[in-house]
Structure formats: structure tokens, C-alpha cells
Amino acid sequence: MSLPVPQPGILEIAAYVGGESKVEGVSRVMKLSSNESPLGPSPRAQDAYRTVTAELHRYPDGGATELRKAIAARYGLDAARIICGCGSDELIGLLVNAYAAPGDEVLFSRHGFLMYDIYARSAGAVPVRVDETALTVDVDALLGGVTAKTRIVFVTNPGNPTGTYISAAELRRLRDGLREDILLVIDAAYAEYVDRNDYSNGLELVQETENTVMLRTFSKIFGLGGARVGWGYFPVGIADVINRIRSPFNVTAPSQAAATAAIRDVEFTTLAKAHNDYWLPWLKEKLTALGLTTTDSVANFVLARFSGTAGKDAAAADAFLKARGIIVRRVASYGLGDCLRITIGLAEENEAVVAALKDFLES
């Protein structure tokens, strides 16, 4: 008797591994590995989540109606063109399955989100990585990587784990340079942190074209990573396609309630942004003073590059930090084996990671 056989390519997928949360033998850890908000969720979001507990026997609103209305009101959008998902990664998977057939190509930059690769392979499509320039998305390289088989191009802006971004002009140049039958997906998970005048989350391209999608998340500045809520803004035709194939109750009732309250709590989001505005440049300055190279991150984390010297490399630094109960993120899976990604934490956490790295580098 033969056992069930998965589709070709499935067993070649390297499963996604999230940031670590625990260190064996350490009771209290400082987790700076997953780009989570150090302030946690809004108190209003917590209250809203709790109020739903007595109704857990009821199915959630399959259309996430109130949440979509709240998102639309916050950003001045058409609620009918918003789709919510179990994290933005669910929406990535739906887009790939809807628009990339076996043998088609899904294009993204060298250090793009690992789920682009995973979802492409799971659909039988071919993931294609193109080089970046100075750890930043290279529009010319992306355009040069397009073939007759290209169906989707993903751009993470700002990038993760790099923290770098491309300008609104470059984003538009990319869209203008792609064929009309190629779907451009702009993954703007960290958009709320960016203050640069030339930055765009891609919203105007979604409004002006029929082949561009913008994705966002509640897992970062809104502090709801555990609730698993993402959303996207879609052209009408693409929204219709995705709504036909998504699960009918893909966002739980407590998660919808928490996300609705979170996006309405502008004061708390402003506080989270102000915290990051202070500590991001502080951490970059302190790491640079220690002799480490960092990218010009505009997100809520810093990417630090270590030397290749044995005992002073990224792996050794990671082990040293863990011994002190500090968890950061190794990013070798992104092709950055000489780097560590460090999330902006609370004041004591940021100060602790700098002090620990100082001891590590000077020992």
C-alpha cells in the first residue's frame, strides 16, 4: 500500500521559523527578536478582546465589517476594497494561489519576506530572487528579472530584515515598468513607522491601477501579533477574486474586536510611534559607536553587521546575548549570516542590549 504523496516541491520548502521567545535556564528574557511593539496592545484593544469572551460560541462576522469600516475611516479608504486576513501572510498566500499557476514565476528581492518563497513553492510556482543594492530593493534588478513567466512581484517597503526603503518615485517606476498582467504586491507592514518625505506605502498606486495591491498588518505598531490580523487594499476585481477563495471566518471575533479598537485608539498608536522615534536613532548611534555597521532602518528594528572574526561574529554575539537573557534575531535564512536584527524594545531592554554587546566586543 502506498502512502499519500505531496505535490512536487512541497518537501523542498524550508518551513518558516519565527523569532525565539525562550532561553533554556533563563526565567526572564528580553525578547527583541520578532519586531513586536514594546508597549504591547492598546488598553482599549485588550478590553475589546475581553468583552467577546462570553460570545465565543458564535461565529465571527465573516466579512469583518466593523473592522473594515474602522480601517477605512482611519485612512480614508473604500471599505469594500479592504480584505482582512489571519495576518497579512494569509493574504500573501491567497494572492499567490489566485494568480500564480504551477511553473509561473513569483519575483521578489534578495532579502524579501521568506513567506513569498514558501507560498510560491506551495502553489507549484517558481520563486525568483533578484539582488539588492546596499541592502535596498533595486528596481532595475527587479525589472531585469521579469520574464514571460512572471505573474507576481512582491516588494517589502520598508524591507525586513534590512529596514531600508525605496521612494514613492521608485515604486511608481517599478509599476510603470511591469506588464499589465503582472500583479504588484506592496507589503507595507512597517509603514506606520516611516517619516521620510519621499516614502509611499503604495496606496496611490492601488487607487490608480487595477493590478496593484497594498498589504498591512496589526502585528507591529498596533501590538496585536498574537491576534493574527492583517489587511489589504485591493482593486475591485482582485478583491472579488480573493473574497471568493478566502476562508469564510478567517479572522476570529476577539481579534476583530481588538483590531477595531486598536486602530481607533490613535493616541496609543501615536505613543508607540513616539517611543520608536526616540529609541531607533539612539540604538543605531550606540551600535555604530561600538564599531558595528547598521543599515539606515526606518522601521522598528536595527540590522547590525558583525565581523567574520571567530568568536566575534554574529553567531557568537547571539550566544553571548542569550546567556544574558536577551533574544535577538539571527537572519542567516535571509542570506545575512553576519548580521543580527534587533527589535526596538523598552528603555531598559535597549540599554541592556547595548551594554551586553559592549562587553561582548571588548572581551
Image: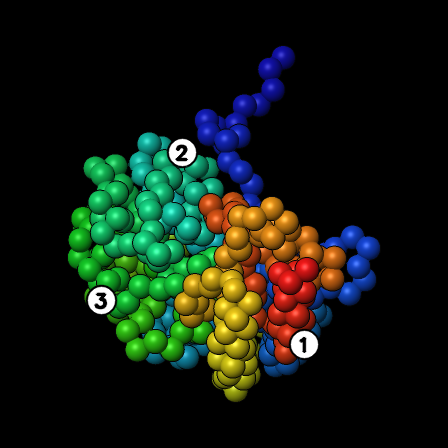
Give residue 318's position: percent from left, percent from top: 64, 54
| Residue shown at 56% from the left, 48% from the top | 309
Amino acid, disc 3: Ala
Q: Which callout, 1 or 2, points at the residue further toward the start of the chain?
A: 2
Residue wearing tag 1: 348
Q: Is residue 16 left or right of residue 68?
A: right
Q: Are marks 1 and 3 in contact (CB under 8 Å)?
A: no
Where does the C terminus fall, quadrant-wise? bottom right
Q: Where residue 111 sits: x, y (%)?
A: 42, 50
How is the rendered protein coloured? Answer: rainbow
Q: Badge 3 is on which residue?
A: 169
Q: Residue at x 71, y 70 (%)?
A: 54
Left or right, residue 295 beside residue 186: right
Identified by mark 1, the residue type is Glu
Quarter holding residue 224: bottom right
- Quick check: can you spot residue 264? no
In space, the residues marked 1 and 2 are separated at their CA atoms by 46 Å
x and y, in percent, of residue 263 in the image: 50, 77
Q: Residue furthest front?
A: 362
Q: Which residue is mark 2?
A: 124
Circle 1 SS class: helix
- The mark lying in front, picked from 1 and 3, is 1
47 or 353, nearer to the observer: 353
